[in-house]
Structures are given as structure tokens and as C-alpha cells.
Image (cartoon, rainbow, N blue to C red):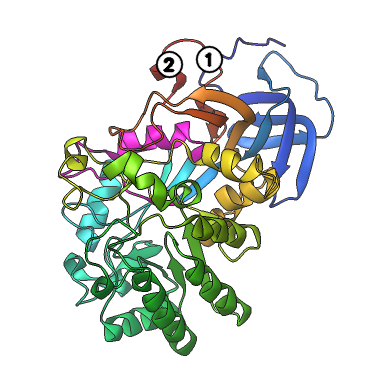
Amino acid sequence: CHLYGYNIREVFNLLLKNVKVIDPASEKDFEGDVLIKNGYIEKVLEGNLDCDSNEEVFDLSGKILAPSFFDTHVHFRDFEESDKETYETGAHAALSGGYTHVCAMANSKPPIDSVSKYEEVQEKIKNIPIDIYQAVNMTIGMKGENLTDFESLKKIGVKCITDDGFPIVREEVMIEALKLSQEYGFILSLHEEDPSFIEHPGYDDTANRKAEISIIERDLKLLEKYGGHINIQHLSSKESVELIRDAKKSGLKLTCEVTPTHLFFTKDMVEKYGTLLKVNPPVRTEEDRVALIEGLKDGTIDMIATDHAPHTAGDKKLGEFKSKSGLISIETAFSVAMEKIYHEKIMSMREIIRCLSTNPRALFGIKSPIATGERADLVVLDKDAEYIYDHSYSKSQNTPLFGRKMIGKVLMTIKDGKVLYNDLKEGTSEDRFNC
């Protein structure tokens, strides 16, 4: 067989040799070989597989092979904000971060709040190389008043309903949404910040933690009474973690996310980074950050979701209170997990992969374990590699991490058996893609 020099080629037969396989779904954790044919996993062996001339071979000694990541919370903008991001550039950023599946939020301009707008998205993404689950708004125009047509959205395959960016303030609207979630099986993905507690969004000192705590308390009570499935987005406070921990003990259909931003940064860093670290909800104290990591470790928090939020440089230069909230993070999520969780010896690699891959997939009803006959959606990782984050495949660069030395790197992303991103290849940054 031929060992190609880590060239990206559109082949359907791949042999990944001497790689450490870690897969929480199938409970695999060993060093061996994986053979991929025609988009599917043909063989998984703890040991060596023979190869033939029809296979492209990658010697991945010292590297980790895991199921590719699924991001349940991204903003790919497009439409009237294509200067910030498009589905295509967002997909490239996702692949470089190890993601082959994402759920795109619906707060585009204009909002994705109808069957026709959803179908317009489907036309835009039909040739995008990753799987994009487009969410649809919970209320028309994201105004928090009149619900979108849940029945029609169910018929066309929508899985996630959200007004992310805005909470559902009116209790009667939330109650009706929960009833429909129960009836149609939708995930209601919730941005939980009561605006009555917020003087200026994006900062801990002007966006009181009660904004998050109070509305989570309300929605947990409503969930218990009316049923349905809620997914609470981007937790920021220790009190919220405790509320969800207690609620899960009672068996409610409840999942939740934490962002890499809230795992990495704290409020005392805002002075240094300014509006680059303005995010909703805001980063809070070190005590909150530690509580979030503990919640991730004990399963209270189900997944790491990036809330990848591209903005132009101009959007971030409008002053402390007028600048847009949010930052890009899909390219660096794995590195953040390595630095702040794995290398701090808080969680194992298997536990981190569960939060980046297995649990998000389960939320959307997807199972792709590293096992014979399964789709080959995979990521190759180096937990110790150091690099300077000085190139973004996103259209935007709004992150305090840009230019920083990071630890833990995505080396290869495989979708349906094809190597779509390969950082083992020499050449320019754009040469790493085959899509």
C-alpha cells in the first residue's frame, strides 16, 4: 500500500493507522486501526490492519480519533449580514474546529420565522459540506408575541425552535410553546435573560445574574407542569447550575449548554479585552466559571456549544454599550477544553468528547459511534499540540483569543468518509480544505 504524504484527495477508502480511538457511545478506548470504505466504517481493530493499493493511509501515531463534533448553537448570519459570515464560511470554520454538524440559530436578518424562509435556507445550504440543522424562530419576527406555525414546521423536518437573542418574557407564550413542544417533539432552545434585570447587556455589572436565574426558575416550573423539552443555552452563573442540577433529579426533559467563552474567561478580563469580551449572558466570576466546569463534569450541563457569533471589526468599535455582543469560538472550542479542563485534570478526554460530540448528537437523535457499518464522521485530535491562533476561516475575527498561543489542535475532519479538512498537510491555510 502507499502512504501518501498527508495529501488531501477525494477518495472513499481510508486507513487510519496507530490511532487512539476514543468513542463514548461505543465505549471504545484503545490504540488501533480504522478502515473506511465508501463513506462508512468497514473495520475497527485493536491492533494492525493490512492495507492494499486502493486505500489512502494515514499514520496517526500519538493522535486521537473521535466522532466528529456537533455544535448545537451557531450563528452563520448570511442573508443581510453576509459581511459577517455565510453558511459557506461558517462551514469552513466549523470543519477547522472538528465539527461536521451544527444547529444554526434563527436570528438572521430577516429572521427565519416561516416555512418559506426555512426553505430558502435549505436552498442556500444544499451544497454545503457539513450538516446544518437550521432552527426556526419560536415567535414571528422574534417579537415574543405570536408563535410560529409549529405544525407546518414539524412537517418539513425542523427540529429546533428558538428566539435565541431574546427570551420569551410572556409566560402565556412560553406555556403554549411547551404544549406544542410536547405535541410535536420540538426542542425549545432558550436564551434565558429577563430584560427587566438588565441595564446594559453584555457585562456582569450591568446585566444582573438575576436576569438568568429568575427566568430559568420560571421555565423549570412551567416545564414540570406542561411538559415538553427545553434546552437552556449558554449558562453563566453558579445558581443556574444548581437549579438545573436539582431539576434533572426530578426527571424533567431538560438539557443545557455552556460555551467555551464562559469556561475560559471571567469578568476581571473584560478591562483587558474590552468589547471583544462583550457577550450575552456576560462572563462572570471565577467562582461561576468553576461551577460551570463542575456542572459539565457531573452531567448537569450536557454539552459544550460555542454560540459562534461573528461580528465585523466595526460592530465591536461602537463603544462599551453600543457594540454588538458575541464572539467567534467554533475554531477554538477544542483548544479551550484542552487548556481549561483536560490539562487541568478536571475531566478525561472521553468525558470531553462526550460533551462535544456524543451528547449534542443525541439531542438531535443522531448516533454515529466508531463501529462497523456506521457513517464515517470523524475527527483527528492532538491534545498536546501548541499553535498560534492567527488565522480565522470565519469571515470575522472578533475574539480575544486571536493571536494567542493555544494548546490542543484539530488535525483532520472527516465527513462521510472524505477528508474535508487536513492540518497535517503542508501549504497555505486554504490548502487544508477539500470541499
> At 37% across and 37% down in the image, what residue appears?
400
Residue that mark 2 sits on:
431
The residue closer to the viewer here, 214 or 56, is: 214
Residue 148 at what x, y percent from top left?
Answer: 24, 71
The residue closer to the viewer here, 367 or 390, is: 390
Residue that mark 1 sits on:
425
- Report the side of 342 relative to 17 (left or right): left
Residue 429 at what x, y percent from top left?
Answer: 41, 18
Q: Quadrant of the C terminus?
A: top left
> At 80% across and 20% down in the image, what residue appears?
50
Q: Earlier in the sequence, mark 1 or mark 2?
A: 1
For the question of whether residue 364 can be seen, the reply is: no
| Label pair 1/2, CB-CB below 8 angstroms | yes
Q: Quadrant of residue 67?
A: top right
Q: Label 1 neighbourhood size at 10 Å, few (<14), some (14-19), many (20+)?
A: some
The residue closer to the viewer here, 270 or 48, is: 270
- Report the side of 218 relative to 206 (left or right): right
Give the residues in magenta.
Answer: 72-99
Q: Amino acid at mark 2?
A: Asp
> At 23% across and 71% down in the image, what residue appears?
139
The residue closer to the viewer here, 264 or 19, is: 264
Q: Quadrant of residue 151?
A: bottom left
Q: Amino acid at mark 1?
A: Lys
Instruction: Look at the picture and state if 422 lies above or below 321.
Output: above
Could you say whether the residue bearing mark 2 is in a helix, strand or loop?
Answer: helix
**Residue found at the far right of this picture:** 47
Q: Label 2 neighbourhood size at 10 Å, few (<14), some (14-19), many (20+)?
A: some
Magenta region includes residue 61: no
